[in-house]
Structure formats: C-alpha cells, structure tokens
Image (cartoon, grey):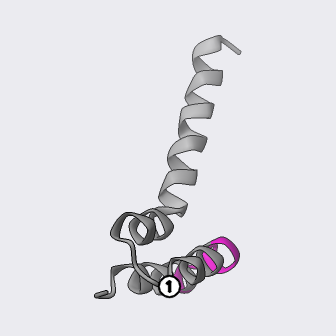
C-alpha cells in the first residue's frame, strides 16, 4: 500500500463525516434556535436517511 492510498482514505473519511453532519453545520451556520436538537437528531438518527432528512429540515426551517 502506498502513501497515496492512505491519504485518499483519510480524505474520503473526512468527506463522509462532513456530509453526515451537513444538517448540523447548516443549523449552526444559520443560527436556528433549535440547533442543539438538530445536533442530537443528526448524531443519533442521521445514519438513517429519514433521521438525516428530518435534521436537515429542522436546520433549514425559518427562524
């Protein structure tokens, strides 16, 4: 295994983690009042598509 393969794995993992936490990043970026709830739902239920979509909807809701 070359070092290029290892760095690609690290970058790939970083991209996946960032994609997983998009709802949380949106919530904190927009300053929504329920950002803690978005974080908890995203953290514990984000692995299911429904939980991720619910967290994103909460983050995108108007203030």
- Residue at figure coordinates x 61%, y 32% from the top left: 9
Asked if the magenta segment contains residue 58, the reply would be: no
- Residue at figure coordinates x 46%, y 82% from the top left: 53
- Residue furthest to the left in view is 62
Work out which quarter of the rendered image holds the C terminus and state it: bottom left
State whether residue 28 is above or below residue 63.
above
Q: Callout 1 environment at 10 Å: few (<14), some (14 to 19), or many (20+)? A: some
Q: Quadrant of residue 38?
A: bottom right
Specify start and end residues of the magenta stretch as a single range: 43-50
Q: Quadrant of residue 8?
A: top right
Residue 19 or residue 27, whichever sits in front: 27
Work out which quarter of the rendered image holds the N terminus and state it: top right
At which x and y percent is residue 61? 33, 87
Which structural element holds mark 1?
Answer: loop
At which x and y percent is residue 36? 58, 78
Kindly identify which residue carries mark 1: 34
At which x and y percent is residue 15? 50, 45
Residue 50 or residue 28, whichever sits in front: 28
């Amino acid at each position: 295994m070359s070092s290029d393969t290892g760095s690609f794995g690290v970058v790939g993992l970083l991209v996946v983690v960032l994609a997983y936490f998009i709802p949380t990043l949106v919530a904190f970026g927009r300053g929504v009042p329920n950002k803690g709830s978005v974080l908890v739902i995203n953290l514990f239920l984000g692995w299911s598509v429904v939980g991720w979509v619910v967290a994103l909807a909460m983050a995108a809701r108007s203030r």
